[in-house]
Image (cartoon, rainbow, N blue to C red):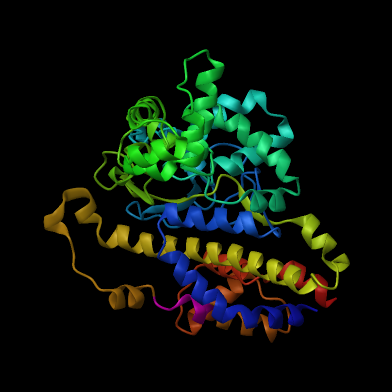
Amino acid sequence: MFQHQIQSIRPLTTAHLAQTMTLLGMTSAELSQKIESELAKNPALELMEERRCPTCKKPLHEPGPCPICSRPSTNNTEEPIVFVSSIADRYNQNSLKNTGYSAEELPDDNFAPKEDLAAYVLRQIASDLDIKDRPIAAHVLTSIDDDGLLQISLFEISRYHHVSQSQIEEIIEIIQRADPIGVGSQSPQDALLVQLKVLQENGNTIPHLAEKAIRDGMSFLSRHQYVDLAKSLKINPTEAEKIAKFISKNLNPFPGRAHWGDVRQNNNDNPPVYHQPDIIVKNLNSKKNAPLVVEILLPLRGTLNINPMFRKNLKNAPDESIEQWKKDLENANLLIKCIQQRNNTMQRLMGYLAEYQRGFILKGDKHLRPTTRAAVSKVLEVHESTISAHLNEMVKFEHQPLTDSQISKQLSKMGYKIARRTVAKYRSMEGILPAHLRKNLKN
């Protein structure tokens, strides 16, 4: 049974490595978009609100990183403290309280998170939503771009949450009436119509034919072609220009920009309210040999899992859908595994760089040490796929289940100095059970 499990993993190796390499090259923002896209189109994936360590998957009951994975593994006081944390637990005073250092030793919190547009809107409308509708609203809000416009279809959202499109539309209507008005619209035209309707409801005087100008004359409005707009509306150019000026003065086709205080702000300016670092490196405290703290931010506000209902219903899937369901499940497993591999690689890489470039980080450019990708690979000793292959072979042909410590010792004899904790990470990524569970399977 267990050997079959190993064999089923191997065909994914090429896809696994290819996708891991792709994910490694992504920024946190790009990875977030990738995850949101997969959540929207793959019903086998779900995002659980339960907080778990991105590395060891143990439940986290308090804010901050995993007290196990963020703990120094040696007595070397200069060894960097490297850990992966959710963007929701962004680095602050509380995030290191489980690492064994006193409050006086912890660094100042210079990275207090700013509220982004999605959180700003969700905070306004949460009380107006049924509890069951809040995850849907959050899905919509995390799928809007910097302009405040929705980037995925209602069909994708309804398919993922197994609700009707009309229910999605009702939730979006609530979102659109939050500040900035029109946020969550599917197009600039839709945003303008929502804003115009709200102005009317608030008792403002609206020019005659303003709504028709937006519905039928958007191309003329955007090009300031008032003569053509007038012909379309069957009015004179002067009236058409007055309508266009009213729309320009009072409405905004890109409601997200209003959140930054300037409704005409160019989206290429990259407003700082949306800026998020991928990695935060800080000195733990002012002591001479204090370790560096390296936090790798994972853009997940929860834990990515396989949807248990999807897995349960797979055996009852219609014949015409069974292949697609299997493909969805395979893709979901692959994404979760590759994100775990990315986390592990980033931890090893940043641990080495933080130690190797300590002088540069603490003292500046003059202390930058030259290096190359090949040199870094050599220092890290071995490509991860090699370790995974050795691990699979060891487990496949073991007479008695090997513990992580025993595997670590055997790898060391082969020339690969891998800590027990690292072995556990690789084993988890490969879907290999712990020794005591493998023993139960063989009995």
Give the residue furthest to the top: 203
Residue appearing at x 20%, y 55% in the figure: 359
Residue located at (56% from left, 77% from top): 15
Figure check: 332 above or below 286: below
Residue 156 x %, y %: 65, 53
Question: Is residue 336 in sight in this rendering?
Answer: yes
Q: Nearer the viewer, residue 406 or 173?
A: 173
314 left or right, relative to 279: right
| Residue that lies at the very extreme toward the left in this rendered image | 366
Q: In percent of the image, x 37 and y 60: which residue is there?
A: 351
The residue lying at 79 percent from left, 62 percent from top is 311
In magenta segment, residue 386: yes
Rendered location of residue 342, percent (x, y) = 48, 64
Where is 217 relative to 360, above or below? Answer: above
Magenta-drawn segment: 381-387
Answer whether residue 232 is magenta in the image. no
For the question of whether residue 71 can be seen, the reply is no
* Nearer-the-camera pick, 407 or 121: 121
Residue 250, position as x, y percentages in the image: 39, 24
Which image quarter holds the N terminus? bottom right
Provide residue 8's location: percent of width, then percent of height. 70, 80
